[in-house]
Amino acid sequence: MDKEILYLIEKLESEKTLTLREYERLISGRDEESAKILAEKAVNVRKQIYGNSVFVRGLIEFSNICKNDCLYCGIRRSNLNCDRYRLTTDEILECCADGYSLGFRTFVLQSGEDGYFTDGILCEIIEKIKSKYPDCAVTLSLGEKSRESYQRLFDAGADRYLLRHETADSEHYKSLHPPEMSFEHRMKCLSDLREIGYQVGCGFMVGSPHQTAKHLAKDLKFVEEFKPDMCGIGPFVPHKDTPFGKMTGGTAELTCYLLSIIRLIRPNILLPSTTALGTIDPLGREKGILAGANVVMPNLSPVSVRKKYELYDNKICTGEESAQCRSCLDMRMSSIGYEIVTDRGDIKKENENGCL
Ligand code: 5AD
Ligand code: FES
């Protein structure tokens, strides 16, 4: 390994910041040895804060109807092969009931940008979940909305919001999205969410079309400056019915390398080892945890709709019941010395350990 890379890793560990050029160098100059050193440091830092606990989130994909047309995404509006569905409020509540009995204490409500679910309907769903399960956190992942809508959902009891920024480079953002979507609006949404008081998650795909190490360096800088509570990163996986269907996907190797870097930038961050990572590598989720991630997000959606929420090809866990995924993940985590805990899994703040 290049001496300069070792120097950058040590600098990142002690200062939790690098310049854009340094991040770029750390990415493009990586090799097996540097990945190993980074992962060791990331795991150490994470262990000091979270021990060997892995937090679990129950993902409920309640509608795959979307008004957007993101070029990478399998549920984009132009994909006429996508079989569309919406869950009813009762079906969503059933998913929560199953999840609760399996030890989930965070429910992530995710959907396409589906106008049917007005603020009123969403608030009712959130209020019902929070009154039935006051010890649970509700996380929303519903895309871009007005500040007023975000505020109403927050007032109804939502705790967290996930909105991946997708890429921190506005030109790159343009190349992944239709003209009516803008990087500026994405950023506005993220800052509104933060100001309202949500715990906020951003995130990006690794190996998305046209992405370079320079773009990734900007993503890392963004994470450093925005200081999200959560950051979802996973490999880009092509979906056959999208304009990017024939493009090359991202790798587990680079995804894990970036997970380690993000852990060192923000020691306390909640960092999922994603389903996309488990899709491109049978041991992807284990590798993500061993690179510094500390969250897994299995699916709680009814098996009858799982295949339809196909953001990318070959998504795993579309045939398994929630209980099967839960015990599968228990086994996978214990096989590498970790344990899934029954806990809301909030971020540990600075005053608890002086780390943020
Ligand atoms: N490959 C990997 N991730 C994808 N997402 C959407 N489409 C794909 C794909 N083809 C991710 C986006 C989005 C999240 C819900 O899923 O980053 O924000
Ligand atoms: Fe779903 Fe393993 S996590 S089957």
Image (spheres, rainbow, N blue to C red):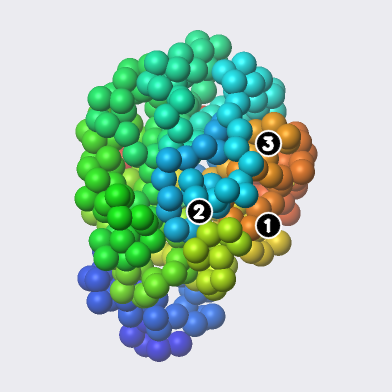
User: Ligand 1 closer than 8 Å to the CB at disc 2?
Assistant: yes
Q: Residue at x 69, y 31 (%)?
A: 302
**Residue 288 placement (x, y as % from top left):** 56, 59
The residue lying toward the viewer, choosing from 33 and 141, is 141
Precedes in sequence: disc 3 or disc 2: 2
Is residue 273 something that shows in the picture?
yes
Q: CA distance from mark 1 to mark 3?
A: 15 Å
Q: Earlier in the sequence, mark 1 or mark 2?
A: 2
The residue tagged 1 is 314
Q: Nearer the viewer, residue 227 or 140?
A: 140
Q: Position of residue 128 (x, y in %)?
A: 51, 13
- Of labels 1 and 2, the one closer to you: 2
Q: Quadrant of the N terminus?
A: bottom left
Q: Which SS class for mark 3?
A: helix
Residue at which label 2 appears = 73
Mark number for residue 305? Answer: 3
Which amino acid is tagged 1? Asn
**Residue 133's quadrant in the figure?**
top right
Real-space Cα distance between discs 1 and 2?
13 Å
Q: Residue 343 at what x, y percent from top left?
A: 55, 30
Look at the picture and state if 186 lies above or below 244: above
| Looking at the image, residue 68 lies above or below residue 62 | below
The 10 Å Cα crowd at callout 3, few under 14, some 14 to 19, many 20 or more, is many
Tell me, for residue 60, which label it has, or none: none
Q: Residue at x 49, y 82 (%)?
A: 31
Badge 1 crowding class, 10 Å Cα cut-off, few under 14, some 14 to 19, many 20 or more, is some
Q: Is residue 171 above or below residue 7?
A: above
Name the amino acid, label 2. Cys
Q: Is residue 257 visible?
A: no
Q: Amino acid at mark 3?
A: Val
